[in-house]
Amino acid sequence: MRPGPLKIPVSVLVVIHTPALDVLMIRRTDGGEHWQCVTGSRDATDTDLHHTAWREVGEETGIACGPGTELHPGLLPWGLSNIYEIWPQWRHRYPPEVTHNTEHLFSLRVPAGTPVRLNPSEHTDYRWLPWREAADTCFSPSNAEAILLLPQWAA
């Protein structure tokens, strides 16, 4: 059982990319070769999705992109969301009646060479990959689809 409060089934997915469309991929601690972009749930039902995106990017990568930071203008909400079934092995993190999550898509444009500092309790490795290759490494179909949409949003 997961210690602490149960997760809210509303999350963000942030595709972090360079101007050349290299995408930051991070490997989960709980999933072998489970590579993904930054993801994370709201911490309260009234938390703004932008705040959730800033917090998750900072917690998972050490990249500051909130208000007052140089990267803040590069955080772009796409106005798109995915609703997907929560995998059975992760349902214990949510209230018992919850089976689906709504994931809101964002991108964050960063300069090439932006330093990454992983949270070791969540991720074990990272790499920058060209966007098509990054999509091929995702274990999550919704994450792969988001990366494939990146050229439309980065233009």
Image (cartoon, helix red, strand yellow):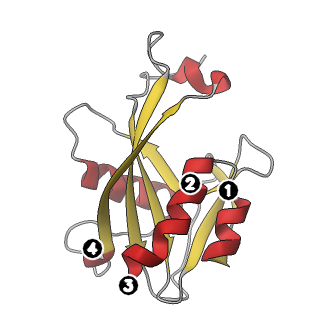
Which quadrant holds residue 36?
A: bottom right
Which quadrant holds residue 83?
A: top left
In primary-sequence order, the first of circles 1 and 4 is 4
Tell me, for residue 138, which label it has, or none. Answer: 1
Q: Distance between the residues labelled 2 and 1?
A: 6 Å
As shown in the figure, which amino acid type bears the numbered disc 4?
His
In primary-sequence order, the first of circles 3 and 2 is 2
Tell me, for residue 143, which label it has, or none. Answer: 2
Residue bearing mark 4: 72
Say which element carries label 2. Answer: helix
Q: How far apart are marks 1 and 4 (CA)?
A: 26 Å
Tell me, for residue 15, which label it has, or none. Answer: none
The percent coordinates of residue 68 (x first, y second) are 20, 73
In primary-sequence order, the first of circles 1 and 3 is 1
Look at the numbered discs 2 and 1 and tell me whether their residues touch, using CB distance below 8 Å.
Answer: yes
In the image, is 16 to the left or to the right of 141?
A: left
Using the image, determine if residue 101 lies above or below residue 137.
Answer: above
Which of label 4 and label 3 is nearer to you?
3
